[in-house]
Image: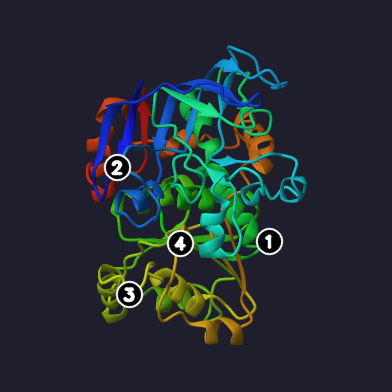
Amino acid sequence: MRALTWHGKQDVRVEEVPRPEVVNPTDAVIEVTATAICGSDLHLYHGRVPSMREGDVLGHEPMGRVVEVGEAVETLEEGDRVVVPFTISCGACWFCEHDLYSLCDNSNPNAELARETMGHSPAGLFGYSHMLGGYAGGQAEYLRVPYADVGPVKIESDLTDEQVLFLSDIFPTGHMAAENADIDENDTVAVWGCGPVGQFAIQSADLLGADRVVAIDRVPERLEMAREHGDAVTIDYEDEDVYDRLMDLTGGRGPDSCIDAVGTDAHGTGVVATSDRVKQRLLLEDDRPTVLREAIRCCRKGGTLSVPGVYVGRADNFPVGPLMNKGITVKTGQTHVQRYLGPLLDQIESGNIDPSFVVTHDEPLERGPELYETFNDKEDDCIKVVLRP
């Protein structure tokens, strides 16, 4: 089959690779009809995530039709149309039983690699390094889905692929970020990063009752999308001081909740942001905590910081003193996607949200390598890429 494969920093190729088959009785195989490039795929593209191997198949936002099921699969059958979560979860361990699906104890066959770095292993993920399982990803014509009774959600309506595809990751991720922000009525919520996850965090903050959402970025088309689809107040951090503007908007108190939808490759202005980029290039730190520092500084006393943005290792000059003294609650984590599939599909089917608004590029899989570059460079007004195998 044809698939997008990783060959090192900024080297993605379309290649012929073996077509997957059922390996375990709880597996299914899907023929992929749509898949997407995620912002966190760019961390792989830049070589930020350890334990990638040349030839690894990329991608963790797929959907398609079931073409084969293992003998123990009970909820799916050939022909079913499904969206596949990026988190691989067994459904039976303590964490899955407590709806903490991204922390599954059993789905990472390389758990020891993760334990060496983190102390414990989270769940296995599609297409996201051997430390997190070494699973082939979904930017391909076919995908093997382990624990098929736990992951995929069936789409039984005539909703388009673009309307439901993002249940695989970015819609639940943005929603969990807003849920983790502990939003109350009359709250002001500040969202750093207006990429796809940020856009869904903005939408979800509104759905959860925020009085006002402030969107922070530097890319004009992303800020425009936040204004048009999220009714957000916007701040271009290259044109104005974020802290000063947020204090003006909140009467000096600061946002009640702050959401970091950026993560390890945060940009910024000034000496400290430049220092982060230099330290990262010299391997003196793994992550650029520019947004984390700014969000901690801006967040009101006793507020909440929600972090859906992906971080991979060490961050230097982290303001733990202000974090502690301001009494800020921090909530983080990969998304427990399976927890949200039913409720968010209901939101789509009821017409409360149409997630397809983020799609700017819908192209054949063969154009994947050049679209990785376009997405990375933020060219051609690119916000979200859907690929068609």
Q: Are marks 4 and 2 in contact (CB under 8 Å)?
A: no
Residue 388 x/y as whole percent: 36, 24
Tell me the CA gap for discs 3 and 2. Answer: 31 Å
Residue displayed at 31% across by 27% down: 365
Q: Say which amino acid is labelled 3.
A: Leu
Is 374 or 178 nearer to us in this picture? Answer: 374
Q: Is residue 203 above or below residue 311?
A: above
Q: Residue beneath label 3, please?
A: 284
Please give the residue where the numbered disc 4 appears in the rendered image: 311
Q: Position of residue 136 (x, y in %)?
A: 45, 35
At label 1, which amino acid type do we have? Glu
Residue drawn at point x = 51 percent, y = 21 percent: 21
Q: Which residue sits at x=36%, y=22%?
A: 389
Using the image, tell me which numbered label, if any, was put on residue 382.
2
> Label 1: which residue?
185
Between 189 and 111, the one lying in front of the other is 111
Q: Residue at x 40, y 52 (%)?
A: 51
Relative to 385, is 81 on the left or the right? right
